[in-house]
Image: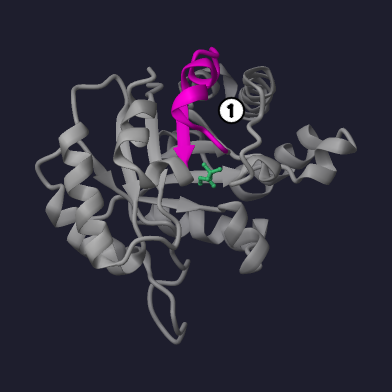
Amino acid sequence: MRKHIVAGNWKMNNDLAQTETLISELKKQIKTSDAEVMIAPSFTNLWHTFEATRNDDIEVVAQNMHFAENGAYTGEVSASMLKSVGIQTVILGHSERRAYYNETDESLAKKVDAALAHDMRIIFCFGEELADRKAGNEESVVESQIKNALFHLEALTFKNIVLAYEPVWAIGTGETASPEQAQDMHAFIRKTLESKYGNVVADDMTILYGGSVKPANAKEIFGKPDVDGGLIGGAALKAEDFYAIVNAF
Ligand SMILES: O=C(CO)COP(=O)(O)O
């Protein structure tokens, strides 16, 4: 079933004290919403945030994980470690991870497999760079990112996957894809899924848009038929702005 989701990716922001402040401000904003609400703090704050929001309509998710179960991977965190602190969902493939930490379609396919093997839900991110769009290659780039990391999966596993289209040129730049550009790409993504998995998987897939979503533009973007929610960076760091976006549905 297709859901509405608004997820806040805090990236490398908020120490423990700032996390506590933001959580208490978020709690004041919560009201019944049509959208599932998620927040992704840094690893150091996952457990605390999970505990502090236990009774609220907020799911705490991780920003990344390693594909191995355990071992000599200094600085890394595994799926079972995340699950042991209550985390059921992980963001994989964010463009910042691809750009700065050499994450590739190949390593992401392994992370996807590891998360699914632990019955975790995945928010799988992808999106073209500015040069790709200028060259008119945005669809082929997105298509290959999806195919290379996900098309080895069986149709049934897609119930544990949420897709997040985040054009790199719109992340943290203040420049949003127009609602029409987002809609066109989301429809293309659905068509790409349909070509391999059929229309049930394609129609049921929740596809989020990410890149400079703000209270001022959320309603228009979320109003598009193939946009099922957002992955929010900067605006997720202010409780009022975040919930204005959640309530844009
Ligand atoms: O990267 C993003 C969410 O994962 C989007 O970031 P901004 O909302 O700050 O553009």
Residue 177 picture quarter: top right
Q: Which residue is mark 1?
A: 197
Q: Is residue 217 magenta?
A: yes
Task: Name the kind of residue labelled 1 in the image.
Answer: Tyr
Q: As drawn, is 147 to the left or to the right of 139?
A: left
Identified at 26% across, 43% down, the residue is: 59
Give neighbour class at mark 1: few <14, some 14-19, many 20+ (Cα, 10 Å): some
Residue 75 picture quarter: bottom left
Identified at 61% across, 23% down, the residue is: 190
Q: Where are the magenta residues, as a range?
A: 212-232
Tell me, what colour scheme is on the image?
one colour
Q: Quadrant of the N terminus?
A: top left
- The answer to whether the residue bearing label 1 lies less than 8 angstroms from the nearest atom of ligand 1 is no
Q: Position of residue 35 (x, y in %)?
A: 32, 25
- In the image, 93 versus 193, the foreground residue is 93
Q: Position of residue 198 (x, y in %)?
A: 58, 21
On screen, 110 above or below 77? Answer: above
